[in-house]
Amino acid sequence: MAKMAPKPKKEPKETAALNLRDIPVEQFYRIKMAAAAERKSVRDLIMALLDGKIRELEKRGLLPKAKS
């Protein structure tokens, strides 16, 4: 059996932790189902939703544009 090439190592990004509390159980299960429907993790789904909202606020001039 042929060996697969190793995955290139990603540069570690600076991250922070965020804990959400008091999420209604039904809402939490719906979030999990939405993530599964899109074949994403809950984290990736939430990040995509947040990124979209932030871009919308930037476009409307309510947030400064992010530095690239």
Image: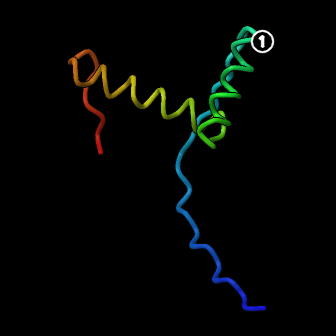
Q: Relative to the observer, which residue lies in front, 60 or 63?
A: 60
Give the percent coordinates (x, y) of residue 36: 68, 36
Q: Name the residue rendered at 65%, 79% in the picture.
A: 6
* Picture quadrant where residue 68 is located: top left
The percent position of residue 7, horizontal first and vertical second, equals 61, 73
Quarter containing the N terminus: bottom right
Residue beneath label 1, please?
25
- Count of marks overlaid on the render: 1
Q: Amino acid at mark 1?
A: Val
Q: Relative to the observer, which residue lies in front, 10 or 57?
A: 57
The residue nearer to you, when weighing 32 against 20, is 32
State the residue lying farthest toward the bottom: 1
38 versus 63 height, above or below: below
Colour logic: rainbow
Picture coordinates of residue 22, whole percent (x, y): 73, 8
Q: Which type of secondary structure does the marked residue at label 1 adopt?
A: helix
User: In the picture shown, does residue 12 fall above or below 14?
Assistant: below
Residue name at image x 48 percent, y 34 percent: 48
* Left or right of 34 on screen, residue 26: right
Residue 54 as seen in the image, left or right of residue 37: left
Rendering quarter of residue 24: top right
Is residue 10 left or right of 61 when viewed as pictured?
right
Q: Residue furthest front?
A: 37
Is 22 placed above or below 5 here? above
Q: Residue at x 30, y 19 (%)?
A: 57
